[in-house]
Amino acid sequence: MRGILCVAALLLSAATLVSQAGPETELSFDVASIKPSSPDDRSGRFITMQGAHQFVARNHTLKTLVMAAYNVPAAGVIGGPAWLDVDRYDTVAATPGENRPTLDMQMAMLRTLLADRFKLAFHNERREAPATENAKPDLFAALQQQLGLRLQASNGLVDVIVIDRAERP
């Protein structure tokens, strides 16, 4: 019985220490470079890991970087300056640690980078929008043509990111 009480006391004290440690440390890249993309760049737009420790995002606007970092569709990012969906950037960053970071870790590092370099500030809102807003028109045509089904648009609440502030890096 005494052993069980000792174990319980140790677990309680460990839980207290963990809760006092505060929020989890933000993940961030070791080093990062963000430069305007070349206007005549025809290499396409991509985000990838080159090797185990080099994160590369080529030819992306701030809006598409936000979409990737927060896993939201284009319609889910609103507001911000006029250049948000115009100016394109190339990002190259070194990731920390011995192992290749997971996709979730890469996106967490990207979120930290966007807040730091672009001074990105936003808030989340729920707004009424067409519930089928993210579906492609081809899908509607295919469903009607092949299955005889017609989708009827309806409105619903969707989560959006509203950009409050962003600065060029």
Image (cartoon, rainbow, N blue to C red):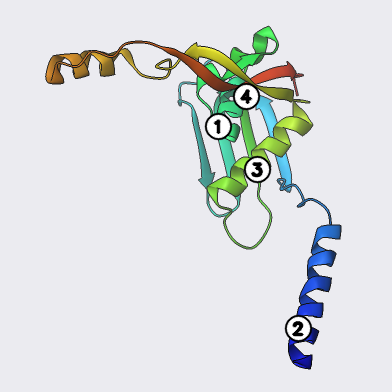
Q: Where is residue 39 in the image (x, y as percent from the top left)?
A: 56, 15
**Which amino acid type is marked by label 1?**
Ala
Q: Which of marks 4 and 2 is in front?
A: 2
Q: Position of residue 24 (x, y in %)?
A: 76, 52
Q: Which of marks 4 and 1 is in front?
A: 1
Quarter of the figure with the C terminus: top right
Q: Residue furthest top?
A: 82
- Which of the marked residues, 4 or 1, is nearer the chain's N terminus? 1
Name the residue that disc number 3 marks: 108
**Disc 3 to disc 1, how far (Cα)?**
10 Å
**Which amino acid type is marked by label 4?**
Tyr
Disc 1, SS: helix
- Label 4, residues with CA under 10 Å away: few <14, some 14-19, many ≥20: many
Give whichever of 127, 26 is nearer the camera.
127
**Disc 4 to disc 1, how far (Cα)?**
14 Å
Disc 3, SS: helix
Q: Nearer the viewer, mark 1 or mark 2?
A: 2
Name the residue that disc number 2 marks: 7
